[in-house]
Amino acid sequence: MNKKYILLTPGPTPIPPSVLKALSQPILHHRTHEFGAVFEFVAGEMKAILHTRNPVLMMTTSGTGAMESSVVNLLSPGDKALVLNCGVFGERFANIFKAYGLNPLLLSSPLGFAASKEEVDSVLKQNSDIKAVYIQHTDTSTGILNDLEALSRVIRQRAPEALIVVDAVSSLGAEAMDMDAWDLDAVVTASQKGLMNAPGLAFAAVSPRAWKACEAAKLPRFYLDWRTMKNSLKDKETPYTPAVPLVVAQAEALRLIKEEGLPNVLKRTADMASYARAWAKDLGLKTLAQNPAHILTAVYLPTGIDGNQLVNSLREEEGISIAGGQEALKGKIIRVAHMGYISQEDLKAGLDALKKRLSPVLEKK
Ligand SMILES: Cc1ncc(COP(=O)(O)O)c(C=O)c1O
């Protein structure tokens, strides 16, 4: 018998039926009033979720493309920037910098820890010429949540003109975000996680301070040039052909979020996170993140369990897809997501199936 496929990975996440249906609508031409109305709705609703009055740009790329756009549009050769590294995605920022010949300062947190505001303050104190600070809101590799409000306060006190650039790829729609109140300069995100859409669409919200930097920036850029995207906003379109079905589907996903109410979406996500943490505690499994985000729960596996094998057998034998560890954490941890359209029932089914496989090993200990 075909089992129901349950997707509990931290991106892509499951897609609501009405969003799937929107993905299969006949294609609109992208230089029409019809598409313009969809584009305008998406841009407006993205502003609402980000809590910003800044323009929101749309790009046909995955989250990494949006991250890259936040480097090439804001910096020039020789600029000094600080990357707060809390896992794989902080390292990705650093790798993007290196690809463009920049050598960022890296402030790495111990495994499972969020960025320390005291350490950020101390680095900024010693480096008054830092032009920008790059931060993950949530690092999906460990499940940590960075306290953007507190970090921004420290940065603004020590380096008032430094740009604060945030990767909210895995946090938006799952964690509270208040771009304007927290005085953030650029926030980038993507469609396939809390935004409940298929992968392939990305966004960047850009503050006036960041626009000034964008005009002066000297790194090479073409497809990801925010200036051309901004120019097209008045015509309610993108400079080049967008992934039309993804934009149409994003409008439907954002309509669903609006209908449920963002505070209710965030509460539902937080409730599922509490459920998963109670499950881990009950089994005696150690969680990885010290300041855990609501997006996922990462737990260390007991010795004797191979994480890769566990993830594969759960998917192949029960149709339940969870994530293992990345890079140094491969085989050692599992990550179970609870964001976006993931339901309490599916989360429970996944955690029950995991418990069945882990209990015999845990009981022997
Ligand atoms: C925090 C974070 N940043 C960036 C990315 C990269 O996004 P993509 O895989 O869409 O390029 C991801 C994807 O997992 C992510 O979780």
Image (tube, helix red, strand yellow):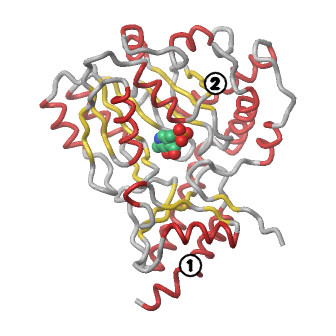
* Residue 325 appears left or right of 48: left
Q: Image point 19% across, 43% down: which residue?
A: 118
2 or 1: tag closer to the N-terminus: 2
- Kindly indicate the quadrant of the structure image that contains residue 153: top left
The amino acid marked with disc number 1 is: Lys
Q: Residue 315: x, y in percent?
A: 65, 66
Give the secondary structure at mark 2: helix
Q: Image point 36% across, 44% down: which residue?
A: 147
Q: Residue furthest left?
A: 126
Q: Image point 41% across, 56% down: which residue?
A: 292
Q: Residue 37: x, y in percent?
A: 76, 19
Establish if 330 lies above or below 250.
Answer: below
Residue placed most toward the observer, 284 or 66? 66
- Kindly indicate the quadrant of the structure image that contains residue 73: top left
Q: Residue furthest bottom?
A: 364
Residue placed most toward the observer, 6 or 76? 76
Please tell me the numbered disc located at residue 355: 1
Residue placed most toward the observer, 154 or 66? 66
Establish if 215 lies above or below 325.
Answer: above
Establish if 166 lies above or below 20.
Answer: above
Please report contact status of discs 2 and 1: CB closer than 8 Å, yes or no.
no
Of badges 2 and 1, the one in the foreground is 1
Q: Residue furthest right?
A: 26
Crowdedness near tag 1: few (<14), some (14–19) or many (≥20) residues, C-alpha within 10 Å: some
Which quadrant is the C terminus positioned in?
A: bottom left
The amino acid marked with disc number 2 is: Gly
Give the secondary structure at mark 1: helix
Q: Which residue is mark 2?
A: 44
Crowdedness near tag 2: few (<14), some (14–19) or many (≥20) residues, C-alpha within 10 Å: some
Q: Residue 130: x, y in percent?
A: 23, 24
